[in-house]
Amino acid sequence: MNQPARTLYQNDQAALRQQPDYSAIRAIPELWPRAAAAYGDRIAMNDPHNAPTATLTYGQLWANIQTFASGLQHLGFAAGEHIALIADNSHRWFIADQGIMAAGGVDAVRSGVAETEEVAYIIEHSDSVMLVVEDLKVYERLQQRIAQLPLRQIILLSDETPPAETPQPIVNFPQLLELGRQQSFQPVTLQPDQLATLIYTSGTTGKPKGVMITHANLMHQVRTLGAVVQPQAGDRVLGLLPTWHTFGRTAEYFLYSVGASQTYTSIRHVKQDFREVKPQYMVGVPRLWESIYEGVQKQFREQPEGKQKLIHTLMGFSQRYVRARRILQDLDLNQPRPGLPARLGAAGIAVLNWPGHRLGHVLVYKKVRQATGGQVKQLISGGGSLAPHLDLFFEILGVEILVGYGLTETSPVLSARRTWRNLRGASGQPIPETEIKVVDPETRQPLTQGDKGLVLARGPQVMQGYYKNPEATAKALDPEGWFDTGDLGWITHDGNVVLTGRAKDTIVLTNGENIEPQPIEDAIARSAYVDQVMVVGQDQRSLGAIIVPNVEALQKWAAGQALHLVLPEDSEPAPPGSQTITLKDGAIQTLFRQELNHQVKDRPGFRPDDRIGPFELVLEPF
């Protein structure tokens, strides 16, 4: 074991000793009686924005999970059967998820707002015998499509009164719990290698694939994520990520396993909840941190000219200081293992700029940190690359962001930055028991450290395979257990993974130009009006883009123009005196054309072929 690997192992083991020992637990549902015994009267979850609202202690949470499971058993549900769970974040989602597993079941999960045909495919393909849906609205949208499926029971997570006549019997959430109280919960013994859940990929390149995640896969994450962050019982957490995504879901299992107190929030309420909850931890995606950054920049622009100049000057001091500090700590990707001259030069720059950086903290940054409640210990980011300007901004503020890397097929975390080795621009070092290597995409031969190639991963978190799809499984997993991530990257001298793009993402235009879309997508995503973007254009004359707009920012822009943006599901009338527009109207199209031109041209290394030609605005996130 070389020195960087030895240091990683020693630090990880020291961090894990601070966390509860769950090494003897075989399956996820076994966590909750342990948590109830350890943290019984502590608040586990607060759900203030979903109807009905609820606050549950750890004791109440475990009691509800058992009652839900008992209700399923009362309805004839047998261990090993599958249930589709089509709903979004709430305390009831978690109770349903763990109630299904506690009854020995496997849930196939998807958002309640996902496209109807995709959801129907998942319900059918997963061999589900029951269906749990968020509310009547979701059920009625699916009703005609699922009428002929062999579903024995529909369960609403809402309190709504079920319809009288339906193809399948329906009960609501309170009715199911009442059924559960009529008999004792019959515990089910689960083995680590048993299937726990089916998480379906987005299906952007064909039919969704059902990723088979076992209890051992999930328990590996619960046991090892404490190497990255060390929350304590009672620490406050804001929960925003979709729990039907593996990232948000595994994060919840881990956080509840250590006794944290989570408040469920939403995009609409997150700014207010930051101020009120004052979280110590939050797990999010780059777009969330981008929105905080944009809000702060907007506040800066609204200051008097003299104050803007002062802020700009202080930020300049801080940028130079932070970049110099990175070199001194060997945390600069561009200057690995700097020699004595580089360190001396960086030390001089740091000394000269430290007073200005410190003044910035006193006058500006301390107040800015209040946007996150002022008590954040760490923010955990995943689900996409974090733009360099965001890494730099939060480092200047003194708010630590730890970036992780993984995929649905890896449950999901493979690597993560640590507080003691927060190498900005990287995706961190492997978490415990995880191997990552880089190979030649054609020969699959290992490459030397620093060479760019295809990233492969192996560890206890890697899926069993794709459900009822042995061909896809064989392509993704080799006989030795190495999973093909499809990502390109390289590994630093201390084992940090640096991602550079997707193996199959290179776009070749008709003029022969080869274009990597990731840097262009990162540039476009800097726009306040862009939530997600995918650059396309293979075998075309120019690049195109599919864009999920930031609806909140777009509505604010429209209001400032005395316009009212009408979306497909809007029910509110337009304000008096305002003109209604849609995403297809000229004003919106012009705004996005200007944003695309500006963001793409401003990025380093811009070439004329990088320009975006046609684009399409879509509302459903990728």
Image (cartoon, helix red, strand yellow):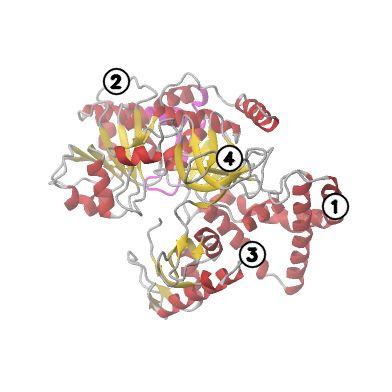
Q: Is residue 115 left or right of residue 608?
A: left
Q: Residues within 10 Å of mark 1 (few under 14, many from 20)?
A: few
Amino acid, disc 1: Gly
**Is residue 388 covered in magenta?**
no
| Of the image marks 2 and 3, the number of the one nearer the N terminus | 2
* Disc nearest the viewer among 4 and 3: 4
Amino acid, disc 2: Gln
Amino acid, disc 4: Ala
Label pair 4/3, CB-CB below 8 angstroms: no
Mark linked to residue 186: 2
| Of the image marks 4 and 2, the number of the one nearer the N terminus | 2
> Which residue is under mark 3?
297
The residue closer to the viewer here, 538 or 109, is 538
- x and y, in percent, of residue 157 in the image: 31, 42
Label pair 4/2, CB-CB below 8 angstroms: no
> Which residue is under mark 4?
416
* Disc nearest the viewer among 1 and 2: 1
Structural distance between the alpha carbons of marks 1 and 2: 68 Å
Mark yes or no: residue 8 visible.
Answer: yes
The answer to whether residue 308 is above or below residue 238 is below
Label pair 2/3, CB-CB below 8 angstroms: no
Mark linked to residue 371: none
The span shown in magenta is: 38-63
Q: Is residue 515 left or right of residue 579?
A: right
